[in-house]
Amino acid sequence: MTDSFPAPCRGRFAPSPTGALHVGNARTALLAWLHARAAGGTFVMRVEDLDFGRVRPGIMEAQLDDLRWLGLDWDEGPDAGGPHAPYVQSERVALYEDALRRLARDGHLFACGCSRRDIAAAASAPHAGEEGPRYSGMCRRHPVPGDAVSITRWAVSERALRFRVDDAEEEVCFDDGVQGRACFRPAADTGDFVVRRKDGLAAYQLAVVVDDAAMGITDVVRGGDLLGSTARQILLFRALGLPAPRYAHVPLMLGADGERLAKRHGSVSLAELRGEGVAPEKVAGWLASTCGLAEPGEHVLPADLVPRFSTSLIPAAPTIVTGASLAALRTR
Ligand code: GLU
């Protein structure tokens, strides 16, 4: 990463409390923490619990407890408080509404009642990516005026609010601390994207931008699956007149079959490892060794890794984790 960002480093980890943290999440958390700590910066824990349908009670507390068991700490967070509280997204909806009003006022939003099926049918070249087919812009004729009354009215009308991506928008490029120069074309890739869902909840893209800005986050270190989202987030930062943070997208952990590491590969959660009596130093050492930051079999505390850490050491390519490696992790 460059030194062009003068502010002291403020990093964050932003888990969604939808299930136990598995080793992939834990490694991302460890790398985000190391990045902030090696820079002498502040580390923020923010809980992204807006997906009410998937959030389960008690999971947030369990996730934070498991991260602390691993040896991570945070200066600000739901349990630590801090100057940007609250640190749980469900308690921050007024900020998202305010941002939506500003975007609407500046003519960036329109209401859209299209179903996924409508969108797929209208897409000229539907592709089966995780994000679904590109949105064709068919509801652009329903711009949302920027006063609070309209926003509330649209909220109960079972229509999503979409951010209009200018067709003339060229590539959006950024220098990623791990992946290098990354360029996307949001107008061609995804098209106009949802910033508030039909159920009235702020969409991930909006909430993450509002919170990263409000919390003064300078450095976002997160999983490589979100690399493509970054271009859309940069468009929102620009539309809101806010500075975008620096980004580093760390590699995902994949099974030997090249698929994202999952239970069927023998992947385990921190809670399971903890329950089986595996030492946190062994888990931290294993996580670090999978991306070349520790020797295989080394036992370390996350704090031991700080002096030898540099984000430039993190490989860009996904990590293939074998069943044998996972089995070795599980032995006490
Ligand atoms: N809450 C997201 C997740 O758990 C992470 C979002 C982010 O880091 O920007 O995948």
Image (spheres, grey):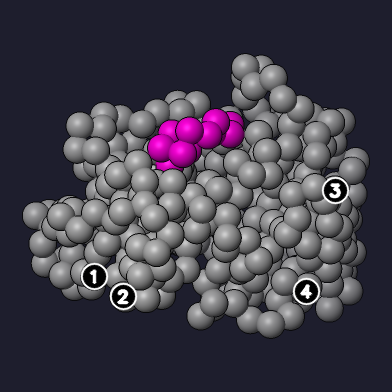
Would residue 137 be found to the left or right of residue 161 on screen? left
Tag 4 residue: 62
Q: Earlier in the sequence, mark 3 or mark 1?
A: 3
Q: Which of marks 1 and 2 is nearer the N terminus?
A: 1
- Amino acid carrying mark 1 in the image: Gly
Residue 157 badge: 2
Q: Position of residue 84 (x, y in %)?
A: 74, 49
Tag 3 residue: 75
Q: Residue at x 41, y 37 (%)?
A: 239
Camera-side mark, 3 or 2:
2
Q: Earlier in the sequence, mark 4 or mark 2?
A: 4
CA distance for labels 4 and 3: 18 Å
Q: Is residue 120 visible?
A: yes
SS at badge 1: loop
Tag 1 residue: 113
Q: Which quadrant is home to the C terminus?
A: bottom right
- Amino acid carrying mark 3 in the image: Asp
Whether ligand 1 has any atom under 8 Å from the Cβ at mark 2 is answered as no
What is the span of residues highlighted in magenta in the rendered image?
A: 236-246
Q: Which residue is drawn at 80% across and 39% down?
A: 42
- Amino acid carrying mark 2 in the image: Ser
CA distance for labels 1 and 2: 9 Å
Q: Is residue 201 above or below residue 10?
A: below
Camera-side mark, 4 or 2:
2
Q: Where is residue 44 in the image (x, y as percent from the top left)?
A: 75, 48
